């Protein structure tokens, strides 16, 4: 594949400049999928014929000299919890196995408007609950770097699809790390933007106050372009913000090496794998060499933060998932004598174990008599986390940390131990609780050739700074290793 | 034993917004099932609520008219429960921070002014409607997501009659302020009540019972009277322990309340702040501006009308209690009609016609028509009796009075010249009655009058005709 064909910017530019046709691009990517998908299982559904038709329409437009969008001809994978009109949106759940949304999510409208072509819907943990994509009701996705390993989760299909050259761009959603952790495991760039910067309209809610859609790409530049397209205020999402990030100074920026960066020592504790730690510290040193000021700071993260996250996210999830009752759409049991049985049996039969666990947890913490002890306490914790981050960002531009304690783990390794799985989120959940933006990027490989991720956390709407530093580091590291399937 | 009664009322009023509280669907009543719906109000995956700003303004108006304080920062919460008419399985409502609180309303009962304190008014969305058929139950979500305010009083109403007067007062105020159209038959105004009784002198309140399914003010009063009696009797027979905190349904056909126990235990709604919506922030300026928009309220209007004109209080009250009647009255008077006469027409003929016409359909009498009719009658061009017929036609067929008079030839014969000819003709034709009258049978004149009216097809000025008749007979 021509180098230009591998990236979002390369494709969009090449198609517009008639270096190649959109249809050619789609054909190449579809061929990759046909060849390798059985190994990876990144997709829940694909749409080859329609994608090709759309590509041809773009080519016709270009031939006629008509304007095409900023992502003309770019194949996109969409996490299967983002609503797409006419394509199934299953959330990897038996509950929505045959559900087709009658409308497009705002992000889908934006992608279509810019000429992007949806190639398929990607696998995920059921309702985005999990860190390995093993909680999908339909299939287990493999990590393209090592097929016996998990791709991470919950946006595991999206990450694996990008790393496998099935698409140069996919959409994920991040509630506690679900974009950043799989991006780290698959060696790509994943961005969880500032809460409110991308519309959630059409994202099947897991935890409304934490969920954000974000782009997953192969490099920083592609991520910048994708965010530019996806962001923006939406009158259909009351939590979406009017603020936007601008990338105009990104590429000619010389400011990144003047930044002050904080390293929170608690993010480098005993649970962190030594190889991961060394790789990240290596990157930090490279940045220091270029003039970036780095200080160690204190940012307590502990199991209490994890508890606060699981209380709030599960509380909201228990309510958000209550609508799946078998009455209007989705799975309906065949065994019922009355409406109550219909609801109970449908939910019992169609939800997976992890989803049920979180619904139970969420229902419990909101119950009368427990609300103050759990939900309210978690909420106070959340406020405290926001204040801690605020303090750090009053002195530092950005925070650098690991994304996960380890590299991609084996399939089946943690699936029977929820606590082990939840610990995957240790370095990521506080970002969601505080509504901050964070980017995960590849910073090296371990001895087994598995990618290691580095996390850049910014203050609200500081995506521009994050991109600058990430771009600087990416250029410096110049990692050329590629997946071989 | 002397008993004291304590009644609290909860009122749900659908706000008069064109679109629903969280989406742009129409709130129009009577549309084909599930046509006023969208992904948001039927809770499809991924759809998000966005608060309709108009809802805040109307709720504030309602609260300001009821002397409430404003929570300048308030928020929506989720009330979680499973029911097929609730598509998200949670109702977006307000829990610990209602938009309005601590208000009061005053109303008159048996010539004393009573004040009832309002605990809170909060915002919420309406649910859909279940339609039970023989084998199936259908759900219509048209009503789902229509904006509601829920008003909760303190348990301070002292009798079912007071409860009746209270809800009537609230309805009138809501209509005046334009908060809700208050159409009870369409469910845009609904209420529940709770009631307890205690022996006079006792300090704490006894167990209260909630009553639902009361579809009119009268039904509510009846239901409360029944429940009041039931509770007093149980206490008097030392069976007070049979009164438990429960919800009872009013069965209007059987005229009694029935326990709804067994439906479910105590609900745990697991309230928590709605994360899809930002807190509602209200500016002081907004409240100040809205205060200026609150129109003259019913009690103020009553007082003013009674001071301004010499009117019957009871009748004026009837007119004031209905915004449309009050408007008709005031406009009629503004167009020059005599106030008491205008009042008589409205309270008498108009209300009778509305009643026979079957309920509170939109009024079809305009004030200029009524003012014109009153002035035509005063001029003597038509009789009062003819006026009544004209009025009825004005109401039924929406015609102008002059139009009806001209078409039906109802102009009164006021010319003495013309009347004298007719009277003489009648007397000649009925010489026996004339003789009877002269012989002292004074009632014979009634018959002769009847003949005059018959001869003129009712158009003779009756007063003038009678005078002429008496004069001519006496002269003979």
Image (cartoon, coloured by chain):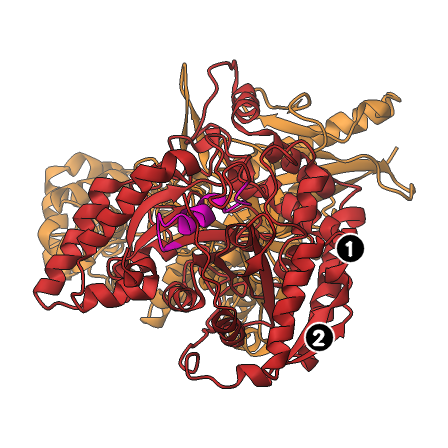
Q: Quadrant of the rendered structure where residue A6 is? A: bottom left
What residue sits right under mark 2 in the picture? A392
Measured from the top left, where is residue A476 in percent x and y? 51, 73
Q: Quadrant of the N terminus of chain B?
A: top right
Q: Chain of mark 2?
A: A
Disc 2 crowd rating (10 Å Cα; few below 14, some 14-19, many 20+) is some
| Chain shown in red | A
Q: Which mark is residue B293?
A: none
Examine the rendering and report whether any part of residue B347 can be seen.
no
What residue sits right under mark 1 in the picture? A302
Q: Quadrant of the rendered structure where residue B259 is? A: top right
Examine the rendering and report whether any part of residue A465 can be seen.
yes
Number of numbered discs: 2
Q: At numbered mark 1, what does the secondary structure look like: helix, strand or loop?
A: loop
Residue at coordinates 59% horizontally, 53% vertically from top-left?
A177
| Chain shown in orange | B
């Amino acid at each position: 594949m021509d180098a230009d064909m591998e990236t979002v910017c390369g494709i969009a530019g090449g198609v517009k400049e008639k270096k190649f046709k959109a249809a050619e691009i789609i054909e190449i990517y579809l061929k990759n999928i046909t060849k390798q998908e059985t190994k990876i299982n990144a997709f829940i559904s694909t749409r080859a014929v329609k994608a090709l038709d759309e590509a041809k329409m773009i080519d016709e437009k270009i031939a006629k000299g008509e304007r095409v969008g900023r992502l003309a001809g770019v194949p996109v994978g969409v996490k299967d919890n983002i609503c797409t009109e006419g394509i199934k949106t299953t959330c990897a759940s038996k509950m929505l196995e045959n559900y087709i949304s009658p409308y497009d999510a705002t992000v889908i409208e934006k992608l279509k408007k810019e000429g992007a072509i949806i190639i398929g819907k990607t696998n995920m943990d059921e309702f985005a609950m999990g860190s390995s994509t093993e909680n999908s009701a339909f299939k287990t996705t493999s990590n393209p770097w090592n097929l016996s390993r998990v791709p991470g989760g919950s946006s595991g299909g999206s990450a694996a699809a990008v790393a496998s050259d099935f698409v140069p761009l996919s959409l994920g959603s991040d509630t506690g790390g679900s974009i950043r952790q799989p991006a780290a495991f698959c060696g790509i760039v994943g961005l969880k933007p500032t809460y409110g910067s991308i519309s959630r309209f059409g994202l099947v809610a897991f935890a409304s106050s934490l969920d954000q859609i974000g782009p997953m790409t192969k490099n920083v530049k592609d991520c910048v372009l994708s965010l530019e397209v996806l962001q923006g205020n939406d009158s259909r999402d009351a939590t979406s913000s009017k603020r936007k990030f601008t990338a105009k100074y990104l590429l000619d920026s010389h400011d990144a090496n003047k930044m002050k960066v904080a390293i929170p020592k608690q993010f480098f504790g005993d649970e962190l794998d030594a190889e991961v730690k060394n790789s990240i510290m290596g990157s930090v040193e490279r940045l220091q060499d270029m003039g970036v000021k780095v200080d160690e700071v204190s940012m307590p993260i502990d199991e209490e933060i994890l508890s606060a996250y699981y209380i709030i996210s599960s509380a909201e999830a228990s309510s958000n998932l209550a609508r799946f009752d078998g009455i209007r759409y989705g799975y309906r049991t065949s065994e019922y004598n009355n409406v109550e049985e219909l609801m109970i049996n449908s939910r019992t039969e169609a939800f997976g174990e992890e989803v049920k666990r979180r619904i139970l947890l969420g229902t419990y913490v909101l119950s009368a008599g427990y609300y103050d002890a759990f939900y309210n306490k978690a909420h106070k914790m959340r406020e405290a986390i926001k204040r801690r981050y605020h303090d750090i960002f009053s002195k530092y531009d950005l925070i650098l940390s690991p994304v996960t304690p380890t590299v991609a783990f084996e399939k089946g390794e943690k699936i029977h131990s929820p606590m082990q799985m939840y610990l995957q989120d240790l370095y990521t959940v506080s970002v969601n609780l505080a509504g901050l933006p964070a980017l995960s990027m590849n910073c090296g490989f371990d001895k087994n050739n598995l990618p290691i991720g580095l996390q850049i956390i910014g203050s609200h709407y500081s995506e521009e700074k994050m991109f600058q530093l990430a771009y600087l580091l990416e250029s410096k590291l110049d990692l050329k290793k590629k997946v071989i399937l | 034993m002397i008993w004291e009664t304590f009644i609290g009322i909860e009122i749900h009023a659908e706000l008069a917004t064109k679109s629903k509280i969280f989406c742009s669907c129409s709130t129009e009543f009577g549309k084909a099932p599930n046509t006023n719906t969208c992904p948001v109000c039927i809770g499809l995956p991924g759809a998000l609520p966005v608060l309709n700003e108009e809802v805040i303004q109307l709720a504030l108006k309602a609260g300001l008219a009821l002397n409430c304080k404003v929570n300048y920062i308030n928020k929506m919460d989720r009330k979680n429960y499973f029911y097929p008419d609730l598509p998200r399985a949670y109702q977006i409502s307000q829990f610990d921070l209602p938009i309005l609180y601590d208000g009061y309303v005053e109303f008159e009962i048996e010539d004393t002014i009573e004040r009832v304190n309002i605990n809170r008014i909060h915002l919420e969305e309406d649910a859909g409607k279940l339609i039970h058929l023989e084998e199936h139950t259908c759900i219509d979500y048209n009503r789902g997501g229509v904006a509601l305010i829920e008003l909760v009083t303190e348990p301070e109403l002292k009798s079912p009659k007071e409860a009746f007067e209270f809800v009537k007062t609230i309805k009138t105020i809501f209509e005046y302020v334009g908060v809700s159209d208050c159409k009870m038959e369409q469910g845009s105004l609904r209420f529940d009540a709770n009631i307890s009784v205690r022996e006079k002198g006792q300090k704490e309140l006894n167990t209260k019972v909630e009553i639902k399914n009361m579809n009119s003010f009268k039904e509510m009063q009846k239901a409360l009277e029944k429940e009041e009696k039931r509770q007093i009797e149980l206490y008097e027979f030392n069976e007070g322990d049979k009164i438990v905190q429960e919800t009872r349904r009013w069965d209007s056909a059987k005229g009694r309340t029935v326990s709804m126990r067994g439906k479910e235990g105590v609900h745990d709604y697991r309230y928590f702040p709605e994360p899809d919506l930002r807190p509602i922030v209200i500016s002081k300026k907004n409240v100040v501006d809205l205060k200026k928009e609150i129109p003259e309220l019913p009690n103020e209007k009553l007082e003013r009308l009674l001071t301004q004109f010499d009117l019957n209080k009871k009748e004026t009250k009837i007119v004031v209690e209905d915004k449309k009647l009050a408007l008709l009255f005031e406009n009629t008077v503004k167009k020059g009609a005599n106030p008491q006469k205008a009042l008589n027409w409205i309270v008498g003929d108009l209300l009778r016609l509305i009643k026979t016409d079957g309920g509170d359909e939109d009024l079809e009498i305009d004030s200029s028509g009524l003012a014109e009719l009153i002035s035509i009658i005063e001029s003597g061009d038509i009789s009062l009796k003819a006026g009544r017929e004209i009025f009825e036609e004005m109401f039924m067929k929406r015609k102008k009075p002059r139009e009806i008079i001209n078409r039906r030839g109802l102009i009164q014969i006021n010319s003495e010249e013309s009347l004298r000819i007719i009277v003489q003709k009648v007397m000649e034709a009925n010489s026996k009655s004339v003789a009877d009258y002269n012989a002292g049978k004074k009632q014979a004149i009634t018959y002769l009058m009847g003949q005059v009216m018959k001869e003129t097809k009712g158009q003779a000025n009756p007063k003038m005709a009678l005078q002429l008749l008496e004069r001519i007979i006496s002269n003979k």
